[in-house]
Amino acid sequence: MKIWTSKHVFDHPWETVTTAAMQKYPNPMNPSVVGVDVLDRHIDPSRKLYSHRLLSTECGLPSIVKSISFTNMISVDERLIYKPHPQDPEKTILTQEAIVTVKGVSLSSYLEGLMASTISSNANKGREAMEWVIHKLNAKIEELTASARGSIRTPMAAAAFVEK
């Protein structure tokens, strides 16, 4: 078993980051993710959001793993925790953990190391994807805000014109 961990601080509030996390796929940074199924999502009594998702991927394994057909003996359990930054409400801390297990082969430790390295590389792509989704969300909010301002001004301008 190999355990990989990482921490990252997003310069965005928790609400924005968690909204983006739920809309992360599909994205151009992780084209290998071809499907996402939500198996369970709930809020516990302490107001923590839990989302158990199953991601379907293509070509997400190192070539050595694919070439020796160990794909049915590999397990990756990944946990992502998003928390508001304790000193800055405009930031969010992401803690990631992945547990990689390769069973039934003599090269298991080596393969687990390869998988952990791949996970680390993909985590960077995942953070880029989050920033991409957040940018899209912020652009949509700006577009809706501008649209709302325009529709509010039009009737008021028409009413002012009629009263004169």
Image (cartoon, helix red, strand yellow):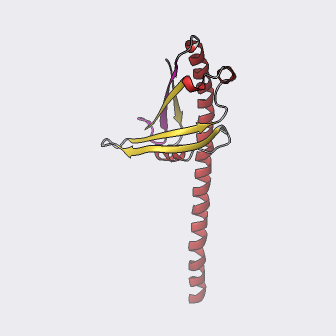
- Residue 81 seen in the figure: yes
Q: Taking 153 as reference, is 102 above or below it? A: above
Q: Position of residue 148 (x, y in %)?
A: 57, 67
Q: Quadrant of the C terminus?
A: bottom right
In the depicted view, which residue is nearer to us: 3 or 67? 67
Residue 125 lies in what quarter of the image? top right
Instruction: Please report the residue visible at 62 percent of the width from the left and 50 percent of the height from the top.
Output: 136
In the depicted view, which residue is nearer to us: 149 or 59? 59
- Residue 13 seen in the figure: no
Q: Left or right? Give the position of 39 relative to 11.
A: left
Q: Taking 119 as reference, is 14 above or below it? A: below
Q: Position of residue 149 (x, y in %)?
A: 58, 68
Q: Residue furthest left?
A: 45
Q: Which residue lies furthest to the top in this view?
A: 106
- The secondary structure that most of the magenta stretch takes on is strand
Q: How many labels does the image show?
A: 0
Instruction: Please report the residue visible at 57 percent of the width from the left and 26 percent of the height from the top.
Output: 72
Q: Position of residue 115 (x, y in %)?
A: 59, 22
Q: Is residue 99 magenta?
A: yes
Q: Does the magenta stretch include residue 164?
A: no
Q: Where is residue 123 in the image (x, y as percent from the top left)?
A: 58, 30
Instruction: Please report the residue visible at 52 percent of the width from the left and 46 percent of the height from the top.
Output: 22
Range of the magenta residues?
Answer: 84-103
Q: Taking 27 as reference, is 158 above or below it? A: below
